[in-house]
Image: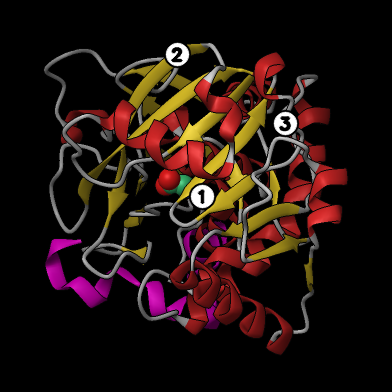
Amino acid sequence: MSVAHPKIAIIGAGIIGLSCAWELLKRGAEVSVFDKQWPPVGASWAAAGMLAPAFEAAGEGVAHPEFFDLCLRSARMWRGFAEEIEQASGQGVGYCEGPALAVALDEAEAEHLLRLEARLVESGLTAERLSRRDIGALERGVSPDFELALALVSDGRVDPRRTVLALRTAIERAGGVFEIVPEGVSGAQLTEGFNTCLDASGVGDGAGAVQAVEGVMLAFRRADMALDHVVRCGAEYAVPRGEHVLVGATVGEVADARAFLLSRAVRFLPRVRSAALVDQWRGFRPATPDRLPIMGRGSDARTFVARGHYRNGILLAPITAEIMAEVILGGELAGFAAAFAPARFGATA
Ligand code: GLY
């Protein structure tokens, strides 16, 4: 069932809430976005901005085929999505296509890359193997002591902060409303006067099935690193962004996050040893028990949910916006998105 004249309240002005707002506005809905502060301080603001479907091919643990497919679909939408937001807002979002470089320094990391390579090839994608000479020509700062290196052509990057800022401009230009929620205002008060509510609150207040998983990021002066590509090694990564190279990220609480990240990053990017550390921040990923997003209809016919995007909120923004616009305005959850429906967590989502 769909609502005839949807007047939609979106809770959360991170990239998921804003992307949904943008798509719903384009399709003629009346939309207001609410958040406690601006710029938003959630996962979107903390993210490095990798658009990295390839790493979901071999997953953390068991790869989830529907999730890999979702990531690929969204990665393919990003170029058009970025162009559209830039045009509508007059602001850049820092979108760059790949390749990202993935290096393995030990046997376990090499095994992971081999699994990933096999899965990519199976899906008709390429993962080009790189020699020492290739890596040297692409990125002189990468350690030559690797066992295996791949160029992941499907993986790009974007600046999430610029994207969030540009999305708000585009939304307001298209007639959408943005409001800061005053302290003490309840959800019920907030959504009074709306016939539809979309919960895109990310970690939000930690209620329901979404839990916060901490991540710490370091920012180095880019001039000291001279890095042009995203480089991944094991669970860590380095991402060039403007004047900085971001090195991340911890997953969960780590006693001395800076020392931990430095010790990991120096293995594949020895230049971090002498690069100026100019910033450091902590963010919280919205994680569900199965680490997959929650997208679809909520607890009643007027309530919808798009949360729990964990490590891939930036990548999944365009496809989430499309899925949510279809279910909210058309009444149907796309078949390929069924695996992510809130119902899998019962009433707690
Ligand atoms: N998306 C990368 C991370 O969560 O660290």
- First along the sequence among labels 3 and 2: 3
Q: From the image, state whether disc 1 or disc 3 is nearer to you.
A: 3
Q: On the rendered image, what quadrant is the C terminus found in?
A: bottom left
Coordinates of residue 143 in the picture (x, y in percent) = 64, 45
Is residue 300 found left or right of 337 in the rendered image? Answer: left
Identify the residue position indicated by label 1 in the image.
Answer: 5
Q: Which residue lies furthest to the front in this view?
A: 145
Q: Quadrant of residue 113?
A: bottom right
Name the residue that disc number 2 marks: 279
Q: Which span of residues is magenta-colored? A: 325-349
Circle nearer the N terminus (1, 3): 1
Residue at 75 percent of width and 37 percent of height: 95
- Labels 2, 1: front one: 2
Q: Where is residue 124 in the image (x, y as percent from the top left)?
A: 78, 84
Instruction: Indicate which disc residue 227 carries.
Output: 3
Circle 2 sits in a helix, a strand or a loop, which is it? strand
- Does the magenta stretch mainly form a helix, a strand or a loop? helix
Nearer-N-terminus badge (2/1): 1
Q: Which mark is residue 198?
A: none
